[in-house]
Image (cartoon, helix red, strand yellow):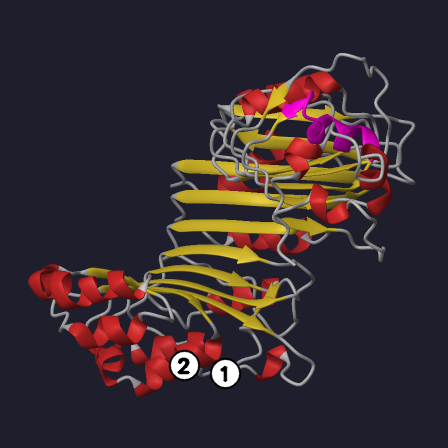
Amino acid sequence: IDKQTLDRICGKILPRINDKVNKLTVEPLSIERIFHAVDYVQLNSLSFVNFSQEILLRHILDNAVIHRLMTEQITCLHIQVSDEVTSNFPVENHSNIFSLILFMCKNLNDLTFSHWFIGLGLTFFIYKLSSTSCVSSTLTKLRIHVNTFDDCLFLLDGRLESLSTLIINIVEIFNTSATIDNTKKLPKLKCFALTSYHHTSFYDSQIVPLLRRMSNLEELTLFLSVIRMESTYIDGIHLHDEILIHMPRLDKLMFSITTMLYNINAKIDLQSNDDIQRGFIEKEIYQVDSYVINDPSKLQQECHIYSKPYPFDVFFNLNSRFPGAKFNKVRWLIMRDGDPFENELFKIISQDFPFLKKLAIFNTAAQQNKRCSLPFITFLHLRELYVHLAHIDYAEQFLYERNAHLPCLSSLEIRYETLSILTNNFTNDAARANCAKLQRLVIKEPFVHPQYFHSYFPLLQC
């Protein structure tokens, strides 16, 4: 917020409405002015966004107004923390804001907590805290990002005795510690959402036993990518017989589950896509789509099952067997395959993912049906394009103006050799229009800027 606007808010607007404000969002540059402008007698919902841990801790501990509000009034709290990490300040040494919040906020019933360490792609470890930490008798709803499956089990071991809703994003799911119980029933839990973007080999040994503990669950959401060895795909029959049968009160189910199979020694008859669909109908699980890659010549077989309408803002590992459908909620798409992505598929994607903002393509196979006249594609909202692990054909499909209209493109990750070839060493006009919009260019290998590089990317922020 610029100073003039902040002066107007604090001097003229807040004094007129302070007794009506029950929800407030603050950021580091304006927090002091906002909290000292007026008294917030009705405030019960507070959000801290874009704070470092050090700055947030200082305000929570040293600002008497904030401390009083959090101790006496706040029932709903949203915290977004991002920290740089150096070798001199390891993750393990970070003070635990999460534990402090639960200790301070005596009336808290709804908490959203996201604490990321920039550059490491991880958040903090909960299970490493003492056994007396993270205790609350009032918290009923928790949204949180954690590092490990142990962190998830820690949150469900009874310390949060009133918890009925847990929405959790786990960086990676490994085998759990033998000291953490994964057997005790969770009768108070009514809503559970588990998201993990990394592949896991511990679905059957860790995730399934956890889900079976939730006997009174009413809503279940799963976003998983599962690796299985010498097995079959996760399908409707498996979901019903191994999980849902243990949840008699379940009323709402949403999922996106990718199974990657590696059957090296066993000869197993794998389900076809028709088999997958029949299995869901047989178990009365409707509004589900799927696609399967059964290729005996390949080591890996793959199946993706997901709810319709698709409920997530990310769609991972889309491949050439994609059947098509509307995905209006998706903002981030990853395409991955060993077989070529032909031009017609990109036309379908531009229509089926109309609000896409981020696209990553992982495919080193050249297009087989490439024509002189490619279908023109439009991505009105695409901001970030990642083609650094893609064949040059896919970079050409998006960067050449005759092939694609990308009015919002601002970030590109690509190999230098690919970019140099497509632009004829930054001299031709074919990709100039789309490249001229870029404010961020990521080329991971070292290179020397040639003569016309800067004029080709006039908006790059150095």
Q: Residues within 10 Å of mark 1 (few under 14, many from 20)?
A: few
* Camera-side mark, 2 or 1: 2
Q: Is residue 145 above or below residue 321?
A: below
Which residue is drawn at the image coordinates 86% and 36% (left, top)? 421
- Earlier-in-chain disc, 2 versus 1: 2
Residue 57 tag number: 2
Q: Quadrant of the C terminus?
A: bottom right
Q: Is residue 113 magenta?
A: no
Left or right relative to 227: residue 161: left
- In this orientation, which residue lies closer to the viewer: 154 or 89? 89
Q: Secondary structure at mark 1?
A: loop
Mark 2, Cα crowd under 10 Å, few <14 / some 14-19 / many 20+, is some
First to last magenta residue range: 391-404
Q: Which residue is label 1 attached to?
A: 95
Along the line of sight, which residue is nearer the eye, 94 or 56? Answer: 56
Query: What's the residue at 78%, 31% (across, down)?
Result: 428
Which quadrant of the figure has residue 282? top right
Q: Position of residue 399 (x, y in %)?
A: 70, 31
Using the numbered discs, state the Cα–Cα distance from disc 2 to disc 1 in whole angstroms: 9 Å
- Residue 392 located within the stretch drawn in magenta: yes
Instruction: Name the amino acid type tagged 1.
Output: Ser
